[in-house]
Amino acid sequence: MFIGEYQHSTDEKGRIAIPAKFRATLGERAVITRGLDRCLFLFSGSDWEELAKKLAALPITDVSARAFGRLMLAGAMEAPLDAQGRILVPDYLRTYASITKQAVVVGLYSRIEIWHDEAWKKYKAETESQSNEIASRLSELGI
């Protein structure tokens, strides 16, 4: 399970260190792709396989299903950890998430999100200011 948030910087080659606590769960074969809210999603190989199968099974006749499948699948790339526990984030994904120097690596149970540090701060502040409304909506879902 991935939990917590960690500040990291990218190096000149576009590599980001993955927190040591996440590495064992992530395994040797990780996959990185475009996420929602202009962040990146990083999955273990097994979690990615599960999600990719679900995306591939969506009806190609549905506009939203095609769009979401393209967002997730076309942007995906294997991201093996190097000896120092870093992954190489391709340029097109760093551009998508506006990641330059500073990034935040966030654990969200079954996936990791990688955010531009300022975008994360803004998102977190907005979400925290709406926490009561969000909690009310989630209570309707049984949470």
Image (cartoon, grey):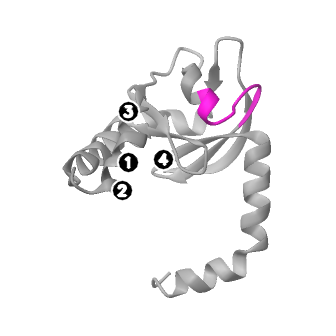
Residue position for label 4: 111
Q: Which of marks 4 and 1 is in front?
A: 1
Q: Distance between the residues labelled 2 and 4?
A: 22 Å
**Of the image marks 3 and 1, the number of the one nearer the N terminus:** 1
Which residue: 69% across, 33% down? 98
Which residue: 46% across, 85% down? 142
Q: Do the residues labelled 2 and 1 touch (CB within 8 Å)?
A: yes
Q: Nearer the viewer, mark 3 or mark 2?
A: 2
Residue position for label 1: 67
Asked if residue 140 is positioned above or below residue 10 in the image, the reply reads below
Instruction: Kindly state the secondary structure of the residue where label 4 is placed.
Output: strand
Asked if residue 143 is positioned above or below residue 109 in the image, the reply reads below
Which residue: 32% across, 54% down? 63
Residue 74, disc: 3
Magenta residue span: 94-103
Residue 64, disc: 2
Hey, what amino acid is under mark 2? Ser
- Count how many numbered circles sit on residues in the image: 4
Hey, what amino acid is under mark 3? Ala
Give x and y (percent) for residue 20. 60, 33
Instruction: Kindly state the secondary structure of the residue where label 2 is placed.
Output: helix
Residue 95 is one of the magenta-drawn residues: yes
Q: How crowded is mark 3: few (under 14 residues within 10 Å), some or many (20 or more)?
A: few
Q: How far apart are marks 3 and 1 (CA)?
A: 10 Å
Give x and y (percent) for residue 8. 73, 31
Q: Residues within 10 Å of mark 1 (few under 14, many from 20)?
A: few
